Amino acid sequence: MTWSFRTAFTKYAHLDGAAWHYADDDGLTKEKYKTWSQWNGYGRVQVQSGGWDGMRSLTEHRFLRGMDGDRKNAAGGTKSVTVPDGEGGSLTDHEAFQGTEFKTIDYTAPGGTVESKTVSTPWRKETAKRVRHWARSPPT
């Protein structure tokens, strides 16, 4: 009798630190209670896969996190955030792109060379605008 067991392992590495966005104006929370409480993810995630005999593949995923225009500090201000695309350019990290994967890199193996990569450039066009009635000055 021959026994065959296949065990697959997946390992994740979250790189570049976490992004926390200042709370959006929801019309309910008073300004003094707001903070950087909105989770906007990681910029890079590496995924390794393999079996009992070692890891065989490595893929890196790069994401936009929507941090451009975020509040700069407790006193106010606005951040200007761009992300290098790794191809000699940069992308504006606009809030509309939060969670958008813009680059995937497949390596020959963990610690290996680049086998293939896919690079996407997101675009946007404003088709509507959200107006918050509680944010406008009352009529005089």
Image: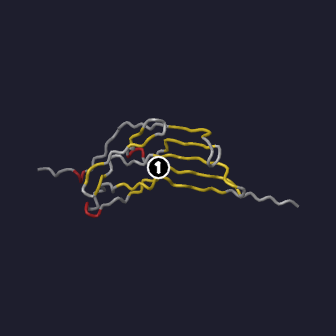
Query: Which residue is at a point 32% across and 48% down the rendered structure image?
Result: 79
Residue at the far left in the pictured view: 140
Residue type at mark 1: give it: Gly
Residue 35: give x, y in percent of width and height.
32, 60
Q: Is residue 1 above or below residue 57?
A: below
Q: Residue furthest right?
A: 1
- Measured from the top left, where is residue 13 in percent x and y? 54, 55
For the image shown, how many numbered marks are present on the structure?
Answer: 1
Q: Which residue is mark 1?
A: 43
Residue 100 on image: x %, y %: 47, 45
- Colour scheme of this structure image? secondary structure
Q: Left or right? Give the position of 100 relative to 23.
A: right
Viewer-proximal residue, 80 or 102?
80
Identify the residue shown where x is 55% and y is 38%.
118
Quarter of the image for the N terminus: give it. bottom right
Q: Residue at x 46, y 35 (%)?
A: 88
Instruction: Characterize the local packing of mark 1: few (<14), some (14-19) or many (20 or more) Cα atoms within 10 angstroms.
Output: many
- Give x and y (percent) for residue 57: 64, 48
Report the side of 24 relative to 139 (left or right): right
Q: Would you place residue 34 above or below residue 130 in this image?
A: below
Q: Tell whether 132 sits left or right of 39.
A: left
Judged from the image, the secondary structure of the residue bearing numbered disc 1 is strand
